[in-house]
Image (cartoon, grey):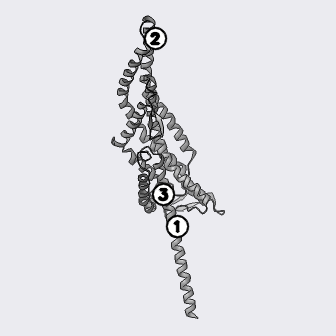
Amino acid sequence: MFTTLQQVSNAYLAEWSQRMLLDAAMSYFMVFLLVLVRLSGLMVIGPFFGHSSIPVQMRMLLAFTLALIVAPALPNVHDRGFQALDQNQDGQLTGAEIPRGVRESLLQDPVAQPEQLAVSRAEFSRMHAVPSTALDLLWVVGTELLIGMLLGFGVLVVLSGLQLAGETFDQQAGTALNEVFNPALGTSSSPTGQLLFLLGTTALLVMPPFDGHLMMLMNLLQTFEVIPVGLAWVDMSTLDVLRHLISQSLVIAIQIAAPLLAAMALLSVAMGFLGYTVPQINVLVLGFPIRAMLSLAILVVTMSGATEAVLDLFPRTLDAITQSLLAGGQ
């Protein structure tokens, strides 16, 4: 009888251990998957990582490798985030100190009271959400993917201002019909627009002290400190930042193209007076090479200023988007 009870007890303990190991493995796999999804968002639309010249397999391998590094270090990453969130340094996150995604998760408990919520350092370091249904998994994956895509889209908006300025150059020079395919955006663009777009991308990659690709990765990794995986939350302030970036991109395009627009306006007036005073001259035939040479000269002069404008706006763009994401998570 005693032997039978011992066998039943051992079988129960073995089954319980297997179940616990399986639950722990599934939980860790889900954390790794959500980390991979957040990093993959940058690989989808980022101006460097999402470029079509980089094979999809290489982008997937990069995201997978980064996820292997980040996922085991999440407790330490959350510990740094806890120190930043704990404003009164009492060792607990209460009230407004708790990130919004965590707060919404805790409030799902029917007995939880908003004014009594508190999260300790140990609890926050282990904080993550494991979706229980397919619908929850779809929502969480979409939110995590959106965080990475927002960072890449913000930088892409800034670089698009250079392309718009280049297309304005070609329209004024008469070479807008000679369009080429822009693989970074998946659309056709004018030669000068493509040139300025690639110039801005190259400047962000190679010109110190920015190292744009590393800055984008660092800002994305910073979101893991305050926004636990599975508890991401995108606030309306992020959309306001993107709207402001679009307006700033248009301002950059106008600033770069303004000298050419002014010169072309003066040239048009001069050609009009010349055609009126000397009717024998074919103003259309004479004006086309003059426009081309003048636009080329102004382009050479303004290229350095265009690069400086992008380099000045790039770090502020990343900081604004990252801070809006972190503020949305709080």
User: How far apart are the two marked residues, 2 and 3, measured between alpha carbons?
Assistant: 63 Å
Where is residue 100? Give x, y as percent. 57, 53
Callout 1 secondary element:
helix
Location of residue 145 with respect to 106 vertically, above or below? above
The numbered disc on residue 272 is 2
Callout 2 secondary element:
helix
The numbered disc on residue 10 is none
Residue at 50% of width from left, 61% of height from top?
A: 31
User: How far apart are the two marked residues, 1 and 2, measured between alpha carbons?
Assistant: 75 Å
Label 3 neighbour load within 10 Å: few <14, some 14-19, many 20+: many
Location of residue 283 with respect to 35 vertically, above or below? above
Lower position in the chain sequence, tag 1 or tag 3: 1
User: How far apart are the two marked residues, 1 and 3, measured between alpha carbons?
Assistant: 14 Å
Lower position in the chain sequence, tag 1 or tag 2: 1
**Would residue 10 appear left or right of 182 to someone viewing this image?**
right
Where is residue 108? Give x, y as percent. 63, 60
Q: Check disc 3 and give the amino acid type.
A: Val
For the residue pair 73 and 66, the one nearer the viewer reads as 66
Q: Which residue is tagged 1? A: 26
Label 1 neighbour load within 10 Å: few <14, some 14-19, many 20+: few
Location of residue 179 with respect to 184 vertically, above or below? above
- Looking at the rendered image, the disc whose residue lies closer to the viewer, 1 or 2, is 2
Say if mark 1 contacts mark 2, CB within 8 Å. no
Q: Which residue is tagged 3? A: 35
Q: Can residue 87 be seen in this view?
A: no
Lower position in the chain sequence, tag 2 or tag 3: 3
Q: Which residue lies furthest to the right in this view?
A: 110
Where is residue 211? Give x, y as percent. 36, 45
Q: Check disc 1 and give the amino acid type.
A: Met
